[in-house]
Image (spheres, helix red, strand yellow):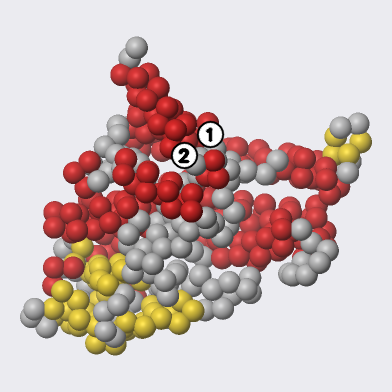
Amino acid sequence: MSDLEQFRTETRAWLDENCPEAMRSPAKSDEGVWGGKNPEFPNPEAKVWLERMAAKGWTAPTWPTEYGGGGLSKEQEKIFKQEMKRINARTPLVSFGLWMIGPVLLEYGTEEQRREHLPKIIKGEIWWCQGYSEPNAGSDLAGLQTRAEDKGDHWLVNGQKVWTSYANKADWIYALVRTSNEEKHGGISMLIFDMETPGVSTKPIQLISGQSPFCETFFDDVKVPKENVVGEINGGWEVSNRLLQFERENISADMFAAENPLDLGQLTKNYVGEVDGAIADPIIRDDLAKLKMRERALALTVKRVMEATKAGSSTGAVSSIFKSVGAELNKDRFEYFLEIMGQQALGWEGEGFDELELQTCREWLRSKANSIEGGTTEINLNVVAKRVLGLR
């Protein structure tokens, strides 16, 4: 038996023994475990699952073992994911720490920053949020005005961020701040600091979906230790762009390009009806076929690029392509749901609607933000035009 075959056998046995039964089905939109200092779990088995996976380092399977990660090779990671999928195991932890700031700390952080923060990310002990956009610096992120003044033994931060996802629940933030006015892009640094630091406050932004994942975040004379700069001082633009690559890759791979847990064919038959085993309406049949082909094409392309990345290639501007294509695809998914469900997809509460229909209405409204978060579609298309097509 080869080493990889042995690894598969051991991984399969461990997952079969340790993955709770309740964790072997797709999670609903409100069942993700974000961790943090005051974690919330949809049920006790979600807590058990996180603790077991974190102890193995498998919440971050390829991160170095010295920081608490799994230390898996790319080949082992592929097998691990296959075995997780085999039993429909849920992701034990939803985390901006795993997707974004953690990988950045591995590349740009000091050894002290890695040892302090990476083990806590892996265990789900810290909930991170991102401080990028500002009221007057959204698409033009380099125009940000939140300032960090050098006060000798600390930074003094003043300013405002907006669309800060889950800032009202997060424990720590990674934020872009202006540390110099000499250059627009060259005067930006990335700071990390505790959200309980005096002077930090948040205000949720109510959305049309009825949920408030986004917040305004305010910094009023916030003192940040000098050692909390990630990367070089005034070198935050490079760090921020690398983080955005991680963000766009994860949005595309994990949300937009993920295999749909719903049986769309059967769902369509339930609402539209069928004739001789086929969907009754030929136009809707055609729409479903196109949607499934787009989903499959994106998933396969993301997989191919991820394999190339594991071999050492850089995704670069490709992440912007995936983000733009994936955002439009996800919005079209929910437009399709509305088409087949009709008025049943427009329920908000009360009798006459099942759980899926009520969730669809909210997710349809929420999907409108897909073309904004992680970089607007316009910005991503500009990246593609310049870096892929060579346009000026």
Q: Which quadrant is home to the C terminus?
A: bottom left
Give x and y (percent) for residue 15.
Answer: 44, 34
- For label 1, the residue is 87
- Front: mark 2 or 1: 2
Q: Residues within 10 Å of mark 1 (few under 14, many from 20)?
A: some
Q: Residues within 10 Å of mark 2 (few under 14, many from 20)?
A: many
Q: Which residue is located at x 37 percent, y 63 percent?
A: 36
The type of residue carrying mark 2 is Cys
Residue 251 in view: no
Whole-number angstrom distance, CA of label 2 to CA of label 1: 9 Å
Whether residue 71 sits left or right of residue 296 in the image: it is left
Tell me the quarter of the picture where residue 135 sits.
bottom left
Q: Give yes or no for contact between labels 2 and 1 (Cβ–Cβ under 8 Å).
A: yes
Q: Which quadrant is home to the N terminus?
A: top left
Tell me the quarter of the picture where residue 280 sits.
top right
Give x and y (percent) for residue 211.
Answer: 58, 72
Give x and y (percent) for residue 315.
Answer: 37, 44
Along the line of sight, the residue nearer the viewer: 292 or 347: 347
Q: Residue furthest bottom?
A: 220
- For label 2, the residue is 19
Q: Which residue is located at x 32 percent, y 52 percent?
A: 123
Give x and y (percent) for residue 229.
Answer: 18, 67
Q: Residue furthest top?
A: 1
Along the line of sight, the residue nearer the viewer: 62 or 294: 62
Q: Is residue 75 above or below residue 272?
A: above
Whether residue 66 sits left or right of residue 301 in the image: it is left
Q: Is residue 117 above or below residue 388?
A: below
Q: Which residue is located at x 72 percent, y 58 percent?
A: 355
